[in-house]
Image (spheres, grey):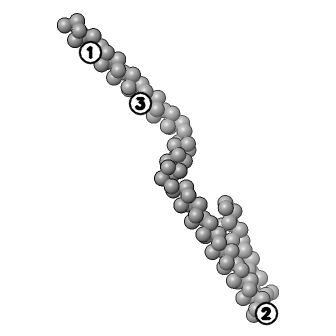
Amino acid sequence: MENAKGCFRSAGLIWLALVVLVGLAGAWMTRNVDTVAEAAAEASGLKDAVARDQAARCERAKREAQRVWDAAVESGRFDESRDRIDETEAEAKLLCAGT
């Protein structure tokens, strides 16, 4: 009987320690949401996919700005196309800011 009480006491202490550890882990994760999210993104490869997508959008915007510039020069209507040129260049700068 004494052996059973000791076994239950040990199981209870192990259960209590487990509950405390889970609580501490939950509290740490709550305070470090950014760290946990970044680690999950890196582990899943999401961060690399986002970077590749951002780089592709930047390149497309640069090509579009260059195309608008070239079209304005070739047509001889550079001054008339200035607003459109400024818009596409601003868009390219915005999209390429993070790369």
Give the quadrant of residue 73: bottom right
Determine the residue positioned at 39% across, 22% down. Answer: 17
In the image, 88 versus 1, the foreground residue is 1
**What element does badge 3 sit on?**
helix
- Which residue position holds label 2? 76
Separation (CA) of disc 2 from disc 3: 70 Å
Determine the residue positioned at 54% across, 47% down. Answer: 38
The quadrant the N terminus occupies is: top left
Q: Position of residue 7 (x, y in %)?
A: 26, 14
**Depicted 20 relative to depicted 28: above or below:** above
Check disc 3 and give the amino acid type.
Answer: Val
In the image, 7 versus 68, the foreground residue is 7
Q: Position of residue 4 (x, y in %)?
A: 22, 11
Separation (CA) of disc 2 from disc 1: 91 Å
- Which residue position holds label 3? 22
- Which residue position holds label 1? 8
Separation (CA) of disc 1 from disc 3: 21 Å
Check disc 2 and give the amino acid type.
Answer: Gly
Q: Position of residue 23 (x, y in %)?
A: 43, 29
Give the quadrant of residue 57: bottom right
Q: Residues within 10 Å of mark 1 (few under 14, many from 20)?
A: few
Check disc 1 and give the amino acid type.
Answer: Phe
**What element does badge 1 sit on?**
helix
Q: Position of residue 44 (x, y in %)?
A: 48, 53
Give the quadrant of residue 71: bottom right
Q: Earlier in the sequence, mark 2 or mark 3?
A: 3
The quadrant the C terminus occupies is: bottom right
Q: Residues within 10 Å of mark 3 (few under 14, many from 20)?
A: few
